[in-house]
């Protein structure tokens, strides 16, 4: 099994917290963990004991409550998690104050160089302006952490801020000024150890301290450091292996909010999208947002199919994954002189550069030694089930000299720097087609692999990874998702369980891009303590890059320009995000008419916002004051209003320009926005009329002043009816 990529195709088992049941009235095997939502209570409870008593009053009287209630929640919503039978739930439904209950869902994980690729350098620019995130607390809901890893050393770290209320459930000597909290919600009262390594690497990406000489088998050697090296880390272990029980996720959020974190990173998602009132991450991050906590989350690893993006609530920053400009280069060299650059972290120094016979091993699931011994074997990923590593092991077993691994169409140009067992290069799909053409053009094809070490400056970077999940976001198509892309391919990060002495390992997936953006948010929080989560998000989105290092539009894995449903606002540019000029701010109460506009019932909206709601006003989704636009094609003209807040120069004027949007008439009114003070607001209307009712169209509106350029992507497409 390919351990580096945490597969999303595994069947999953339902995990229950082990529980010794104290009562004798119910057949224990009928019990399941239920998440129970209660109505907003008018009377205020003075302490958590009263809340617990109120929660217990919903259970049958004749049983041992403490063996049944797993968690009584305080911040994420009014309610609790309990072991109940379906009969007991039916009884509970009759009690006043009951709102809803469902069996808990199981969520899955989405599973060095990146700071400098993002333009972050010591003592200058954003790291200087933000004190490298000093004093900001990043809470991660994940698989635990390896506290002894050098990335969590506390050299140069300040004490945690006074507001910090968190706990260290390790042997206390394992926590320090870097790792200030660690809790275990999977097996309470045991160390929150990281068995699979996911939480250790996400923590090191977000806020790892400086570690010199970090490398992966001698490659990509350099100083390993997280995005916000002076931020504190708090780990909330809510996952066991890759499965994360809903009751534990909710408990993790409840604690993180109570403890006083500033930023939350969660690289976990549902397997199927749910409406917000049925999505624990959406509900919990709403409560976090109300307290000013910023939430970054992974878009998911189910690309490149459309409609696969997860964690798309508008109060979450939803992050897709792309490449960096660093490659651990291995080049396929052919007899006709052509060269195709691929990747491999196995870089044998003594591999002969002599051209060897090249044979087509197809899927390389079975090979005959007499055909391949001493040759370079071309293997394709058309089958896809047999892992890359297994293909390499077979080539080695039958005596092949090396392997050229070519991607299938779905993988496109996405290549991985695996530590291969045989001299290998993995090349992209288009290069693979040319290699096959060459092999078919001659009766004596020859080739070899040339190892070039770690290279920088790939002109295609950033390119979206094939697996990065794509929009539209099915539960709310009027919000453009993902919001942003960030580094997620071949990332060197802290390894929880060093193999062969490797303290750092190479990883990929949207799980890696999410903590990069949590780190960026921590830097911005330090630099702008009074900005709301929505303002930070807007700053990140309106300043993102939409061109790659080669000055072409950012591409996806097909090496064609990427759709807005793939990249959202573009690739994060932290330095520009620090000084955006204007922001699109959103107050917590602004989300209520938006949620009502999703046609949720009053009770469903109440579950999310945790107070009594009467949906008297509702707005279309695209009317939320979001920094990007996702607009349904309609025959009549539609007008959306946006309000921007001046965070640039007190006295400034912005003019608007519209780019792209073929087949759509766009008018913006007014065309000039003038400001005379900081934090002054100004509104404008965007009117959109589709001329072609079937097509997709995309483009940008850009507000520019002498100094700033504030870009909002606009995607117009026929929204899919899901009624
Ligand atoms: C409890 O339920 C299980 C399955 O529903 C059944 O096999 C078992 O016999 C029941 N036990 C009792 C004591 O009723
Ligand atoms: C109730 O359950 C708890 C936890 O399982 C246990 O510690 C306690 O002894 C039980 N009390 C009774 C009266 O059975
Ligand atoms: C670092 O930031 C301070 C203000 O916080 C500024 O005065 C100084 O010029 C900055 N230094 C560099 C090298 O950017
Ligand atoms: C805690 O760590 C200290 C120092 O490493 C060690 O001496 C002690 O035995 C540990 N305690 C436990 C309970 O593991
Ligand atoms: C990594 O770089 C450091 C500093 O440049 C050097 O001392 C060290 O030997 C290098 N390690 C490897 C494995 O190349
Ligand atoms: C290259 O070196 C490795 C170990 O140093 C050895 O196992 C391998 O056989 C060598 N390969 C060749 C082609 O000499
Ligand atoms: C391998 O190929 C040789 C020659 O074509 C053939 O004689 C032999 O049976 C094959 N072996 C297997 C295991 O297919
Ligand atoms: C909500 O209901 C109205 C009226 O039936 C409909 O026009 C609208 O499309 C619905 N909105 C959503 C998001 O389903
Ligand atoms: C924007 O549209 C709203 C409603 O359609 C209207 O009331 C308002 O006057 C418009 N503002 C501008 C500047 O056109």
Image: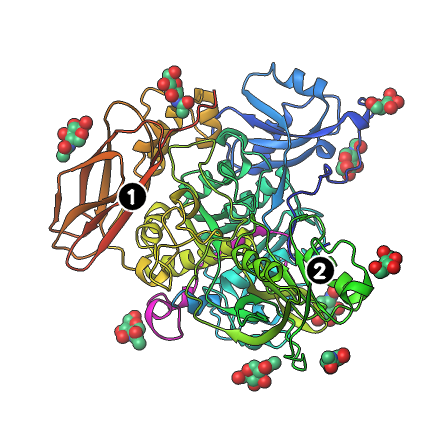
Pick whichever, 580 or 57, lies toward us. 580
Question: What residue span does the magenta drawing correspond to?
Answer: 120-146
The answer to whether the residue bearing label 2 lies less than 8 angstroms from the nearest atom of ligand 6 is no
**Measured Cα–Cα span from mark 1 to mark 2:** 41 Å
Pick whichever, 428 or 612, lies toward us. 428
Residue 262, compared with residue 393, is above or below; it is: above
The dot on residue 699 is 1
Instruction: Give the residue at the far front of this rendering.
Output: 443
Q: Position of residue 644 (x, y in %)?
A: 23, 44
For disc 1, the neighbor class at 10 Å (few under 14, some 14 to 19, many from 20) is: some
Q: Is residue 122 left or right of residue 236?
A: left
Mark 2: secondary structure = helix
Asked if residue 542 shows in the view, the reply is yes
The image quadrant that residue 278 belongs to is: top right
Residue ID for mark 2: 389
Is residue 133 a member of the stretch shown in magenta?
A: yes
Earlier sequence position, callout 1 versus callout 2: 2
Picture quarter with the N terminus: bottom right
The dot on residue 290 is none
| Residue at horizontal 63 percent and vertical 79 percent from the top | 353
The answer to whether the residue bearing label 1 lies less than 8 angstroms from the nearest atom of ligand 9 is no
Q: Is residue 357 left or right of residue 55?
A: right
Pick whichever, 66 or 377, lies toward us. 377
Asked if residue 165 shows in the view, the reply is no
Q: Position of residue 166 (x, y in %)?
A: 55, 54
Mark 1: secondary structure = strand
The image quadrant that residue 371 belongs to is: bottom right
Residue 505, compared with residue 509, is above or below; it is: below
Indicate how the structure is coloured in the image: rainbow
Q: Position of residue 530 (x, y in %)?
A: 31, 53
| Residue at horizontal 78 percent and vertical 25 percent from the top | 30
Residue 656, compared with residue 619, is above or below; it is: below
């Amino acid at each position: 099994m390919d351990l580096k990529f945490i597969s999303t195709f595994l069947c999953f088992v339902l995990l229950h917290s082990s529980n010794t049941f104290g009562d004798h009235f119910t057949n224990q095997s009928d019990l399941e963990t239920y998440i129970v939502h209660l109505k907003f209570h008018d009377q205020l409870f003075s302490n958590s004991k009263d809340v617990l008593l109120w929660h217990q009053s919903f259970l049958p009287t004749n049983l041992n409550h403490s063996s049944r209630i797993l968690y009584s929640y305080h911040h994420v919503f009014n309610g609790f998690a309990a072991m109940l039978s379906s009969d007991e739930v039916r009884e509970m439904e009759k009690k006043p104050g009951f709102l809803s209950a469902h069996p808990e869902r199981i969520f899955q994980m989405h599973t060095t160089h990146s700071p400098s690729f993002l333009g972050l350098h010591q003592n200058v620019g954003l790291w200087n302006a933000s004190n490298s995130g000093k004093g900001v607390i990043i809470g991660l809901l994940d698989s635990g952490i390896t506290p002894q890893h050098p990335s969590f050393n506390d050299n140069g770290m300040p004490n945690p801020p006074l507001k910090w209320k968190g706990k260290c459930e390790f042997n206390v000597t394992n926590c320090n000024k870097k790792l200030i909290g660690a809790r275990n919600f999977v097996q309470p009262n045991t160390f929150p150890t990281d068995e699979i390594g996911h939480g250790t690497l996400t923590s090191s990406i977000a806020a790892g301290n400086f570690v010199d000489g970090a490398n992966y088998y001698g490659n990509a050697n350099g100083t390993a450091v997280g995005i916000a090296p002076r931020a504190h880390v708090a780990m909330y272990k809510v996952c066991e292996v890759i499965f994360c029980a809903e009751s534990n996720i909710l408990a993790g959020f409840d604690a993180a909010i109570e403890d006083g974190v500033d930023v939350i990173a969660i690289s976990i998602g549902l397997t199927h999208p749910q409406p917000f009132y049925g999505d624990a991450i959406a509900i919990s991050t709403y409560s976090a947002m109300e307290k000013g906590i910023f939430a970054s989350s992974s878009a998911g690893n189910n690309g490149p199919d459309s409609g696969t993006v997860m964690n798309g609530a508008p109060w979450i920053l939803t992050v897709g994954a792309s490449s960096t400009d660093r490659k651990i280069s291995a080049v396929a060299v052919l007899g006709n002189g052509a060269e195709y650059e691929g990747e491999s972290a196995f870089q044998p120094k003594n591999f002969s550069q002599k051209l060897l016979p090249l044979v087509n091993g197809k899927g390389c699931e079975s090979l005959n030694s007499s055909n391949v011994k001493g040759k370079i074997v071309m293997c394709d990923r058309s089958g896809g089930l047999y892992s890359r590593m297994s293909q390499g092991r077979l080539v080695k077993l039958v005596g092949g000299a090396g392997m050229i691994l070519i991607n299938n169409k779905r993988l496109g140009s996405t290549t991985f720097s695996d530590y291969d067992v045989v001299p290998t290069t993995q090349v992209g799909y288009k290069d693979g087609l040319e290699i096959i053409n060459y092999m078919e053009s001659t009766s004596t094809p020859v080739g070899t692999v040339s190892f070039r070490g770690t290279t920088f400056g790939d002109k295609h970077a950033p390119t979206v990874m094939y697996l990065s999940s794509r929009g539209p976001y099915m539960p709310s198509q009027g919000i453009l998702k993902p919001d942003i892309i960030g580094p997620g391919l071949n990332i060197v990060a802290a390894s929880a369980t060093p193999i062969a002495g490797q303290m750092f390992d190479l990883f990929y997936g949207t799980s890696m891009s999410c903590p990069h953006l949590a780190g960026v948010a921590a830097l911005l929080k330090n630099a702008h303590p009074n900005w709301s989560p929505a303002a930070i998000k807007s700053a990140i989105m309106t300043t993102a890059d939409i061109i790659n290092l080669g000055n072409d539009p950012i591409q996806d894995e097909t090496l064609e320009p990427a759709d807005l449903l793939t990249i959202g606002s573009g690739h994060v540019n932290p330095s520009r995000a620090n000084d955006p000029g204007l922001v699109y701010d959103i107050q917590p109460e602004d989300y209520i008419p938006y949620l009502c506009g999703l046609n949720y019932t009053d009770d469903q909206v109440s579950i999310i916002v945790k107070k009594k709601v009467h949906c008297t006003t509702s707005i279309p989704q695209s009317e939320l004051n979001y920094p990007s636009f996702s607009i349904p094609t309609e025959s009549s003209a539609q007008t959306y209003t946006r309000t921007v807040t001046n965070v640039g120069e007190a006295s400034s004027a912005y003019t608007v320009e519209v780019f792209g949007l073929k087949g759509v008439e766009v008018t913006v009114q007014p065309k000039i926005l003038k400001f005379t003070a900081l934090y002054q607001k100004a509104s404008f209307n965007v009117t959109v009329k589709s001329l072609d009712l079937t097509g997709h169209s995309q483009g940008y509106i850009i507000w520019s002043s002498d100094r700033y350029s504030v870009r909002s992507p606009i995607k117009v497409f026929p929204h899919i009816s899901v009624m």
